[in-house]
Amino acid sequence: MTGRELVPTAGIPLIDVASLPQPPAWTEDALCAQVDNDAFFPEKGGSTREAKSVCARCVVSTPCLEYALESDAQFGIWGGLSPRELRKLR
C-alpha cells in the first residue's frame, strides 16, 4: 500500500472530492469571504447595514445577486439584498 491510497475506516465511505459541487468562480473575488459571516445572516429583525455596506463595495455583487435569484436563496444577504428584498425582486 502506498501513501496515496485511500482506505475507508470505521465504515465511513470514501468521497471523491473532485465530484463534489464547486462554488461559482466569482466567489473567489467576493468581499464577504473576508469579513464575519454572521453579518450576512443576521437574526430575525437584526441589522443588514454591515452586510449591505460590504456588498456595495464588492465587484461581484451582480453575479452574487443573479446566483441568489437562480438558486431561490431564502436566507442571508446576497448581492446587497435581504431575503425580503429578494422576494420582491422575484
Image (spheres, rainbow, N blue to C red):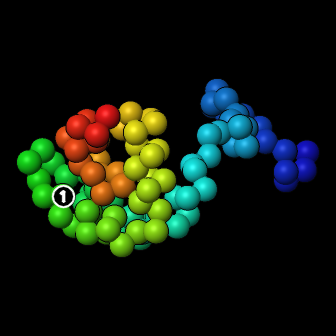
Residue at image position (71%, 37%) is 19
Q: Nearer the viewer, residue 12 or 32?
A: 32
Q: Quadrant of the C terminus?
A: top left
- Which residue is pictured at 46% across the width and 44% down the height? 67
Q: Which residue in the rendered view is the most extreme toward the top?
A: 11
SS for dot 1:
loop
Q: Residue furthest left?
A: 45
Q: Is residue 58 above or below residue 39?
A: below
Is the residue 51 above or below the residue 81 in the image? below
Q: Residue furthest right?
A: 1
> Residue 15 placed where, x, y %?
68, 36
Most foreground residue, 25 or 70? 70
Residue 44 located left or right of residue 23: left
The image position of residue 45, as x and y in percent, is 8, 48
Between 17 and 86, the one nearer to me in the picture:
86
Position in image of residue 61 (x %, y %): 41, 60
Camera-side residue: 34 or 9?
34
Q: At which x and y percent is residue 33?
A: 43, 64
Q: Label 1: which residue?
A: 48
**Amino acid type at mark 1:** Thr
- Residue 86: quarter of image: top left
Q: Residue at x 36, y 38 (%)?
A: 73
Q: Is residue 38 left or right of residue 47?
A: right
